[in-house]
Amino acid sequence: MATARPHRATPRGTDARLDQLVAASDVVLTCGAGGVGKTSVAAALAATAAVQLDAKVLVLTVDPAKRLATAMGLSGFGNTETVVGRDAFAAVGAQPRGELWAAMLDTRASWDELVGRHAPDELTRDAILANPLYRNLISTFVQSHDYIAMERLHEIHASGRYDLVVVDTPPSRHAIDLLDAPARMADFFASRLLRWLIAPYRSRLANLASKPFQAVADRLLGASFLADIAEFFLLFQSMYDGFVERAKSVEQTLRDPTTSFLVVTTLEAGPVQEAMFFCDELERRGLRLGALVCNRTLPPGLGDPAARRLADHWQRHPEAAAATLSPVADHGPPAAGSDAGPDRQDRDRQDVDRQDVDPQDRDRLAQVFTTMGQSFIDYAMLAAREAELAARLAPLAERRAVVPQLDHDIADLGHLLELGRALWPT
Amino acid sequence: MGLLDRRLLFVTGKGGVGKTTVSAALARCAVAGGKRVLVCQADGVGSLAAAFDVPPVGFDPVEIEPGLHLMAMDTEASLREYLKLHLRLPLGGRLGPLASVFDFVAGAAPGVKEILSVGKIAYEVRERHFDLVVVDAPASGHVISQLAAPQGIRELVKVGLIRNETEWMGDLLADPEVTAVLLVATPEEMPVTETLELLGRIRSETEVSVAAIVVNRVLPELFNRREGALFDRLAEPGDWQDELVRLNGDAVHPVLEAAALATRLRRSRASHLARLREAAPDVAQIYLPFLFARPHGTRAVQLLADALAAELD
């Protein structure tokens, strides 16, 4: 399918997990429930691959915000592929061995291109693009976002322009819609229903089977609206065969042995359920699960039983804990007043910053121990739940990556590479 | 006017922020206030029933406890009901072959599925079968096409029964005394960004008013400033930390690290909250706490309902 591509060198001595996956794949698709960090994982993987491999890497994203572009040092990027400057890497002290390219999936523009490619002539193309229904249709069409993402991927993959393409998939109501999109698109254009709808307008011999439908539809929607739709599909008809064939090749790209899926999830009940469902579906369809990424996990120390005992102790006996520090905290009288309102705190703040902490205020210190203990207990509860979910996920994937919860947002390429290091330890 | 004094509330937001739990909590609050409430799962596949610990429900509202009714939207059933009411078509239990044809037209003709969905909801409101209808609405984007469906249909469909229906539906949705949207967000980067985008789109593309932003999963503040300074001294290597380790061993480190992580997470989230407040100063904000306890089923819903009741007070 793809044309000859340059040999990709894998750096020696890499303690590899995901890099094995990436080295064996031409296409990696990240999937998962909404809000689990797919976009960041896709970008981090692509950026890291560009740094570590002598390869031309593209990340195709659906990220609606400018955030990712900014993080990669681009003022913005659209449907056209844009290279990420070496200076952006240099700014965070990285020297990429390969190249990082980025493109944003613009559903509208991609559909327009697709119509342009498949329309038999310019007249038909212009008529379709000018049709008032067209815009509405591509936004409500059978999973038009999912399909166009796959279509775009196929086009890029077939061009052989990149060694590795990482695709951040659109948030589907169900991740599985994505896998079905090409087949559904093919079904849609091959559908008898389409012919029913157009039949009365195409020939005077109205199809008998379509009659009851026409009668109801006319009363509900009015005949003129139906005529509008029919006209649109008549125009589209000239492209059916092209679309059906294309949808089949797009599906082939998904089945290609060099295509793999990266299922991303957080260790929360909803996303995990979605991830498990997706892993099962991949297996059922004979598609390749490359790896499972558990994103935003809590630190392992929260499962430490000795720490838990200490937290319990501090939470229950904070005064005793505070008292243990008295030898080092035994100078000066207690601070006047305690934590009055925020104004008071603001005024106090400078004193706190300038002088040593007032060590005499044991009540306050005791409060700190209570809070630390309680906070550990709270987060340990979350961590225990994460561990349970991780155990349920374990049998689903041979390769797994565990990415810790970052306490900052992804603001630059350095943060993406930091995330990449968790995905791909060196 | 009070949030729960309206008759139709759409609850929406980015996927994964807790729309369903918030919808359920909202319904619980209203039922506790003596109202007859219908909660409608708009996309028909979510976990609304699970939030109430009851088996999945269908298109016909089920009273799961006094005053609290659940239903799941089903556009085919909505069409069937509509046809029965208005066309007196002799349709059996199912639409049969018509259903797949309908599916196709609804997929192709913009707004048809949406109008059938929003139409059923608006019908329940108009007929005053309930005091309040809470819609667990689709996520960002999809909700716009629902809320804007009457306008959209009016522009595209010039005649026909559906066109006629759009008039009263549009009026009902546009009346701020009757209908409002609640945006659910979490204090994180993308959810806040998407909430602000959604707010802009609802205001520019629909006629429905936004009543409030519900910020879900707000982390507790750990330390005030003075306590924070004491904690910093404990968390940084130095005499206090050495003393703690000497007395308690290495178990000290995970506890200190956990508190440090909690503090940083809280701080990062506070900045997103501030951004939300700044960008939408005219929209009321309701804060609901992060639940560390197992956030499942009725208990989580009840905890949030209590928090919501306190906020609405």
Image (cartoon, coloured by chain):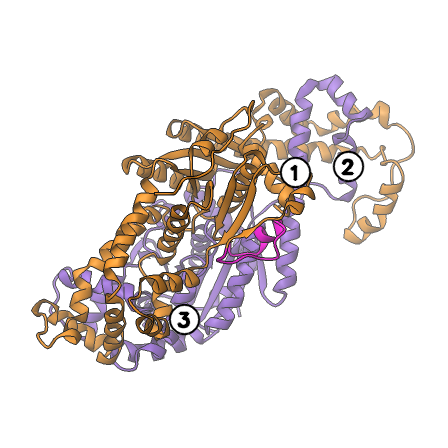
Q: Is residue A271 visible?
A: yes
Q: Chain of mark 3?
A: B
Question: Mark 2 sits on what residue?
Answer: A364
The answer to whether mark 1 and mark 2 are in CB contact below 8 A is: no
Precedes in sequence: disc 1 or disc 2: 1
Residue at x 77% of width, y 33% of height: A365
Q: Is residue A405 visible?
A: no
Residue A250 locus on image (x, y percent)? 32, 49
| Residue A218 numbered mark, or none | none
Tag in front: 1 or 3: 1
Q: Is residue B132 left or right of residue B102?
A: right
Asked if both marks, 2 and 3, belong to the same chain, the answer given is no
Residue A167 locus on image (x, y percent)? 45, 46
Local SS, label 3: loop
Local SS, label 1: loop
Q: Residues within 10 Å of mark 2 (few under 14, many from 20)?
A: many
Residue B35 belongs to magenta span = no
Q: Residues within 10 Å of mark 1 (few under 14, many from 20)?
A: some
Quadrant of the rendered structure where residue B299 is? top left
The type of residue carrying mark 3 is Ala
Q: Which chain is orange?
A: A
Between the C-alphas of marks 1 and 2, the distance is: 45 Å
Q: Which residues are magenta?
A: A63-80
Tag in front: 1 or 2: 1
The type of residue carrying mark 2 is Arg
- Colour in which chain B is drawn: purple
Residue at x 89% of width, y 41% of height: A354
Question: Mark 1 sits on what residue?
Answer: A94
| Residue B148 numbered mark, or none | 3
Q: Chain of mark 2?
A: A
Between the C-alphas of marks 1 and 3, the distance is: 48 Å
Give the main secondary structure, helix, strand or loop, of the magenta stretch. Answer: loop
